[in-house]
């Protein structure tokens, strides 16, 4: 482990570079598992965040060029046609899965134990009122 940046790498190396297949662990515990070329994420790989969400994709010299994002609750992000937590339907993914309807009683987070009353004009984790962010 590098004592300065507090991250680590385990895997194939070439001339002290991460090169081949390996795992890079970030200081917060998130991990990239996949291919490296001369220290860069390159080829197929997956970043798994500490909350369980992940980004699977293809990297070219450290740049993510194709991606598939999945949240910890299994909701897959879509680039187009995104209809999750909108003004028309402000329910969280778990509410949609369990068919909880968007009434005055709904979740303040994607945690089913967080059932609370939401004021009109406010939506879940993103608190908003007439477009202002608090």
Image (spheres, helix red, strand yellow):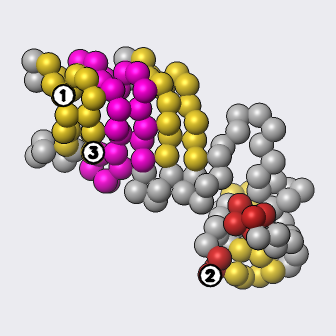
Q: What residue span does the magenta drawing correspond to?
A: 26-48
Q: Is residue 97 magenta?
A: no
* Residue at image mark 1: 12
Q: Is residue 96 left or right of residue 71?
A: right
Q: Is residue 32 left or right of residue 22?
A: right
Residue at 61% across, 72% down: 111
- Number of the label disc, if any, that sits on residue 25: 3
* 1 or 3: tag closer to the N-terminus: 1
Residue at 32% across, 53% down: 28
| Label 3 element class | strand
For discs 1 and 2, the disc positioned in front in the rendered view: 1
| Label 2 element class | helix
- Number of the label disc, if any, that sits on residue 113: 2
Q: CA distance from mark 1 to mark 3?
A: 14 Å
In the rendered image, the quadrant that contains the C terminus is bottom right
Q: Is residue 34 magenta?
A: yes
Q: Position of residue 61 (x, y in %)?
A: 37, 17
Q: Position of residue 108 (x, y in %)?
A: 68, 73
* 3 or 2: tag closer to the N-terminus: 3
Q: CA distance from mark 1 to mark 2?
A: 43 Å
Q: Is residue 127 visible?
A: no
How busy is the neighbourhood of tag 3: few (under 14 within 10 Å), some, or many (20 plus)? some
| Label 1 element class | strand
Q: Is residue 105 above or below residue 60?
A: below
Residue at 33% across, 26% down: 35
């Amino acid at each position: 482990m590098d004592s300065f940046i507090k991250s680590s790498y385990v895997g194939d190396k070439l001339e002290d570079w991460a090169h081949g297949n390996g795992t890079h662990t970030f200081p917060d515990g998130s991990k990239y598992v996949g291919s490296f070329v001369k220290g860069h994420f390159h080829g197929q790989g997956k970043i798994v965040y500490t909350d369980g969400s992940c980004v699977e994709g293809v990297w070219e010299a450290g740049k993510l060029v194709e991606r598939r994002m999945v949240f910890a609750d299994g909701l897959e992000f879509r680039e187009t046609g995104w209809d999750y937590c909108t003004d028309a339907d402000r329910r969280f993914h778990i509410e949609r899965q369990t068919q909880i309807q968007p009434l005055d009683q709904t979740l303040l987070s994607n945690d089913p134990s967080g059932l609370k009353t939401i004021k009109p004009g406010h939506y879940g984790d993103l608190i908003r009122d007439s477009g202002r962010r608090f």
